[in-house]
Image (cartoon, rainbow, N blue to C red):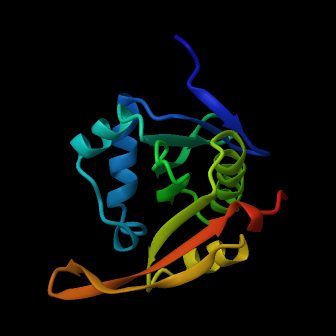
Amino acid sequence: MKSAIFMRSERLVYRLTMVRDVEMVLTLENDRENISYIIPWSRDEHITTLNDSDKRHIVIEDEELNQVGYIILAGLENPHQNIELVRIVISKKNKGYGREAIRALLQHVFGELGAHRIWLDVKVHNERARQLYLSLGFKQEGILRECIKNGDHYESLILMSLLRQEFTTP
């Protein structure tokens, strides 16, 4: 079987997600540490993404090839060279994996994919993620006020982006 590994960083390996990985993805999404920060997808939504040429679904593994998270990108075919970081979820918190993965991802997006801009949205209450993005050079562009209904209340999203000329290689 051809290796789906397409990128490496100091401690992590990045490979294309396969159908067999979707259960891990669903487990991470529904974990109580993560669920309040994302909008979980169904199994079918993830599987559809695996075969969508405009999207890239990526599993993150440590040096021992243990799964430690995943990333979803969208906009690979965007004529304006804008790529969306749809989601990054890390299972092993406080190890620097999120920072390392985003740095590697930025090198991939601006280098190999030739993007002009990467953007994301983050829930207002996800201060930890927002601070991480700011520390990596992302700029806050605005707030989508009360745009997500969650039970009996609404949540707001912060839009953030990073332009190629703002990105500095670590």
Considering the image in quadrants, where does the C terminus appear? bottom right
Residue at 52%, 41% in the rendered image = 59
Q: Is residue 104 left or right of residue 74?
A: right
Residue 70 vs residue 170, the one in the foreground: 170
Residue at 65%, 57% in the rendered image = 102
Residue at 50%, 58% in the rendered image = 85
When the figure is inspected, residue 159 is found, relative to residue 74, above or below; the finding is: below
Residue 69 vs residue 74, the one in the foreground: 74
Give the image location of residue 96, x and y in percent: 70, 62
Residue 130 vs residue 78, the one in the foreground: 78
Give the image location of residue 38, x and y in percent: 37, 67
The single residue placed furthest to the front in the displayed view is 79
The single residue placed furthest to the top in the displayed view is 1
Residue 95 in view in this figure:
no
Residue at 82%, 62% in the rendered image = 168
Residue 28 vs residue 46, the one in the foreground: 46
Residue 136 in view in this figure:
yes
Give the image location of residue 31, x and y in percent: 36, 61
